[in-house]
Amino acid sequence: MKQKLKLTTKSDYKNMNIQQLRKFVEQFEARDSQLRGDTHPIVKGMLLGALYPGFIGDKAVPTIETLTQAGTYLIGGDREGLDKHETKRALGSKPNTVSMSNSSAKFACEERALEIELDYAELDIAEAHGAKETLKLKRRAGHIIHYILHLVRELEIAEKVFGYDNYDSGQRITLSGSDQWSDNDSDPEGVIIDAVEAFETQAGISPNTLILGVQVYNTLKQHPALKSFISDNRSKKVRHEDMLEFFDVENILVGKGIYRDNGVVSRIWGKKAALLYLPPEGMQLDIMPYHTVNFEWKKRFDVREVAREDTVALKEYMSYQIQTLSKKFGYLVEGAIA
């Protein structure tokens, strides 16, 4: 019999503390007498295993939840709030009028889905060792498709955020030779200072987030400029907070994820860096300058267990579109290290 169970996505529960997470899981366990099969324990296991270290996509781009699969979304204009206007008026006179321009973004969320089949023979082997082994087998299968779906989304986000053609010519730089941060004589601070200036000129506010591939991050931790920045009164090991202070940003996101394509293992985030503005929690999304967003239809993902003639299939569905809204509201450092 087909079972369907809906559950909040990673972007919903990523801010839960451990007590909230346990309470959420207990709510599913309390429904045991109302559900058939092991669907909800499978989902529970996937939930607890879904906070994959090294994946930063959910933090690197804001999520805009949509009520339809496709449509048009109004976004801010060309930062008209930066224009100087005459605000004085004589008593009784009409105030000067300012205009508000709106541009729009068309979105079309695409369905993403994977399934994995368990042969009844496999289930029989597991069941011979007890219900816990059966549940463990199903959780492992569910974890695989859950991980792959999030891996693919991480790749899509990285391609947008680190895509060279997704930035205007004045909002990107390609480093080479002794300018690359893997060279001890390079000037990473100077590059970021120039990048901030370019960003502020276009957006009117300062970027607050530096996104780095883990190879770039580890190289910077060994850079003489950062080591000399540290006080002589403590160890010269560069800490995360040292890098925040050195580059004068609020957040540094480090992409550590890897993927395999035709047997070749690669880093998802590569040897690049990007400066963006990301909204503080609770900030209204439509008034800020965003480079890339995630349009997401149906905030909940679906997990289903379907019995077939020879197998039991586990399925998971997602629907979203990663879209670059503005090529000028960001700054890319291509070839940050050799």
Image (tube, grey):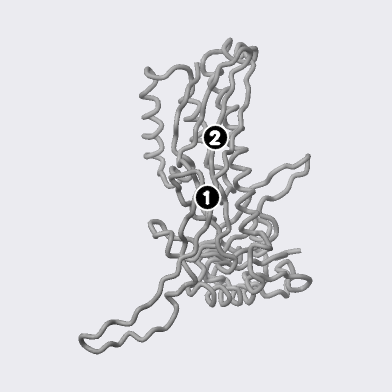
Element under disc 1: helix
Q: Which mark is residue 58?
A: 1
Q: Are marks 1 and 2 in contact (CB under 8 Å)?
A: no
- Asked if residue 53 is positioned above or below residue 33 in the image, the reply reads below
What residue sits 40% from the left and 35% below the top? Answer: 22
Q: Amino acid at mark 1?
A: Asp
Residue matched to label 2: 317
What residue sits 62% from the left and 38% below the top? Answer: 148
Give the quadrant of residue 17: top left
Tag in front: 1 or 2? 2
Q: Residues within 10 Å of mark 1 (few under 14, many from 20)?
A: some
- Asked if residue 227 is positioned above or below residue 284 in the image, the reply reads below
- Of 10 and 45, nearer the camera is 10
- Give whichever of discs 1 and 2 has the lower sequence position: 1
**Residue 266 percent location from the top left of the image:** 73, 48
What residue sits 47% from the left and 55% below the top? Answer: 73
